[in-house]
Image: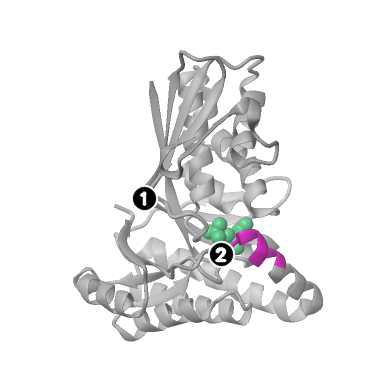
Amino acid sequence: MTVATAPGKVILFGEHAVVYGRPAVAVPITQVRAMAVVEDSPRPGVYVIAPDLHYEVSLADMDGQDALFVTLSQFQAAAGLKEWPDLIITVSSAIPIASGLGSGAAIAAAMIRALAIHLHRPELTNQAQLSALTYQVEKVHHGTPSGIDNTVVAYEQPVYFIRQQPQNYLEPLVVSRPVQLLVADTGVRSSTKVVVGDVRRQWQEETATFEAIFEACGQIALSGREALEQGNLPKLGQLMNENHSWLQKMTVSSPELDTLVQAAQTGGAIGAKLSGAGRGGNMIALIEPEQEEKIRQTLLAAGATNVFSSIIGK
Ligand code: PMV
């Protein structure tokens, strides 16, 4: 039996703009993880079981567009596996789905890791390989993903990321002092594919305006990276607030996200913003550790359905 996990993630700076070649900063959220368990099976075939979702399906019956099918076929091609042995793959995740925390990427990465170890293909657990395979699965969820989710989930380190050809630019970041975030859920589920498509339509109609917004977000990511490396919390907080304002101009915030961001900002957080595709999902607040309980209560009172703490760089 082989067990592997992969973390969730949040985008600190630069979501959406990253799709258009601007830099972004993302960090793993190690408190919530996806897990895959691979075991040899007494019954013939490959079965994927997700007990939390009361889901069980055999590879033979899977839809070709299914993310699980794409995960398995990507692995099979990369491993040069002619025939599958009989396996049971059990998948579970503490990462809420469709809420900006990278659950799809984490499930794919955990499955590929567990399969690679179980089937003696250690080269496929290499971070770059894992990230590349996970990217292929991200396409099912996102349409045109920038590649930042699979990167941060596979490397399990804060990353500064630029989508570019022929190869994305990627720099793992070293955080000089632990940075504490509260991650709060609006409880509203949102499709990244839909929101990214909507931003694209607006960009096509108002190219100059949207290019200027993306450029501003890119500059924020550049400064944010420096502030994170230096442990400059006031600067980080200010940049998060500014990034949120630009995301509002992109129309990817929502009343629920704005309420939580404002509650955090007025309730004592150093800074706050939505994280991920937006229109729902989670927001993040940068806080001083001694403020944690107070700001958690403020967020819950403002309608957050779930709040958890995550420390970056520890
Ligand atoms: O919703 P999430 O957390 O998967 O984030 C998507 C981030 C975007 O920048 C909106 C899209 C992308 O592919 O980078």
Q: Nearer the viewer, residue 8 or 65?
A: 65
Which quadrant of the structure image shows residue 246?
bottom right
Secondary structure under the numbered disc 2 in the rendered image: loop
State the image coordinates of residue 283 (x, y, percent, origin top left).
44, 69
> Mark 1 = which residue?
32
**Residue at the disc numbered 2:** 190
Q: How many marks?
A: 2
Q: Position of residue 57 (x, y in %)?
A: 56, 32
**Residue sitting nearer the eye, 296 or 242:** 296
The N terminus: image quadrant? top left
Q: Earlier in the sequence, mark 1 or mark 2?
A: 1
Position above or below: 24 against 126: below
- Figure quadrant of residue 289: bottom left
- Location of residue 171 in the rendering, given as x and y in whole percent from the top left corner: 52, 50
Specify the amino acid type for callout 1.
Answer: Val
Prevailing secondary structure class for the magenta stretch in the rendered image:
helix
* Residue type, label 2: Ser
Q: Is mark 2 within 8 Å of ligand 1?
A: yes
Marks 1 and 2, Cα distance to the nearest angstrom? 19 Å
Which residues are drawn in magenta?
A: 190-197
Q: Quadrant of residue 16?
A: bottom right
